[in-house]
Amino acid sequence: MREYAIAAERYFGREQGQAWVANLGKMISFMVRVTITPEWVGLLDFQALFPSALPL
């Protein structure tokens, strides 16, 4: 939950971020981080694929 607290403070500011995390702590007992590593990544270039569909 520490990483979430750091992110909340960065997003909301120190005071409001701490209040947000304290309020969240009343609703949930734990957090987990889910990491997804893709096996393949592709780029869809719609301008090259469908040039007439995009207004210029």
Image (tube, rainbow, N blue to C red):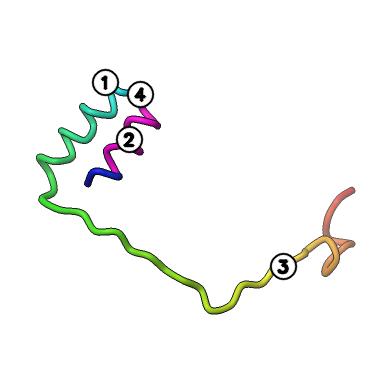
Regarding mark 3 in the picture, which secondary structure is present there? loop
Q: Give the residue pinned by disc 3.
A: 44
Label 3 neighbour load within 10 Å: few <14, some 14-19, many 20+: few
Label 4 to label 3, Cα distance in Å? 37 Å
Q: Nearer the viewer, residue 30 or 49?
A: 30
Label 1 to label 3, Cα distance in Å? 42 Å
Disc on res. 8? 2
Label 2 to label 3, Cα distance in Å? 33 Å
Label 1 to label 4, Cα distance in Å? 6 Å
Q: Give the residue pinned by disc 1.
A: 15
Regarding mark 4 in the picture, which secondary structure is present there? loop
Label 4 to label 2, Cα distance in Å? 7 Å
Q: Earlier in the sequence, mark 4 or mark 2?
A: 2
Residue at position x 38%, y 31% in the image: 10
Q: Which amino acid type is shown beneath numbered disc 3?
A: Leu
- Discs 4/3, front: 4
What is the span of residues highlighted in magenta in the rendered image? Answer: 4-12
